[in-house]
Image: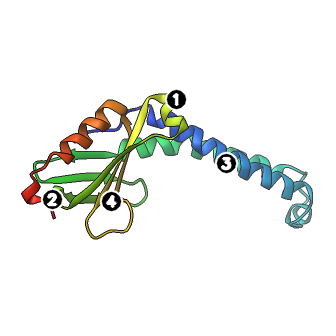
Amino acid sequence: MMKLDSRVQFVWILQYMVRFTILVVLIAIADTTDVGSVRSWLGLSPFVFTAAAAFILVLYTITMPIMRYRRWAFDLLEDEFHVHRGVFTQVHTVAPVKRIQHLDVAQNVLEKMFGIAKLVIYTAGSRGADIVIPGLELEYAELVRDQLKNTDEEDAV
């Protein structure tokens, strides 16, 4: 089984930080405007809920990318592509190489900064991407794409 590049953890941490900063700002606004009178009913000072939410979200931002990284694995066999992933719900995906119709190697701004990419695999009979492998070194993602692309034409669907 192959693992993701460890730099993907930093990309995930930065993505979580952006999302959760917005969420903490919204909680702070609600906390100071007494939208929920629960704080005043409990006799708590302003920003108590904000501080609690920020603490929980910081813990989540640090631990979740590490757990996600440890749970990601994939393997390219002769006729199948296997993906194991998931922290709370574990998923094992198997895609027959014969059913692969389209392959992309994509990078967002953060992935480009860290020198990693994602491999997107589309298979027959599906509307969107069936498998997305994040956190691969760009050259390795292109190598896997080329390996999957170079299957026998007579085996293709």
Query: Nearer the observer, disc 1 or disc 4?
Result: 1
Q: Residue 80 carries which label?
A: none
Q: 78 or 149, which is in the foreground? A: 149
For residue 3, above or below residue 52: above
Distance of label 2 from label 1 (alpha carbons): 34 Å
Mark 1, residue position? 113
The answer to whether marks 2 and 1 mark residues whose Cβ atoms lie closer than 8 Å is no
Badge 2 density bin: few <14, some 14–19, many ≥20, Cα 10 Å:
some
Mark 2, residue position? 98
Residue sticking out furthest to the bottom? 125
Q: In this view, does 108 lie to the left or right of 87?
A: right
> Earlier along the polypeptide chain: callout 3 or callout 4?
3
Q: Give the quarter of the figure containing the C terminus.
A: bottom left
Q: 75 or 39, which is in the foreground? A: 75
Can you give x and y, in whole percent of width and height, for residue 58 in the image?
64, 42
Distance of label 3 from label 4 (alpha carbons): 26 Å
Mark 3, residue position? 20
Mark 4, residue position? 91
> Earlier along the polypeptide chain: callout 2 or callout 3?
3
Can you give x and y, in whole percent of width and height, for residue 45 in the image?
91, 51
What residue type is disc 2 on? Lys
Q: 54 or 22, which is in the foreground? A: 22
What residue type is disc 3 on? Phe
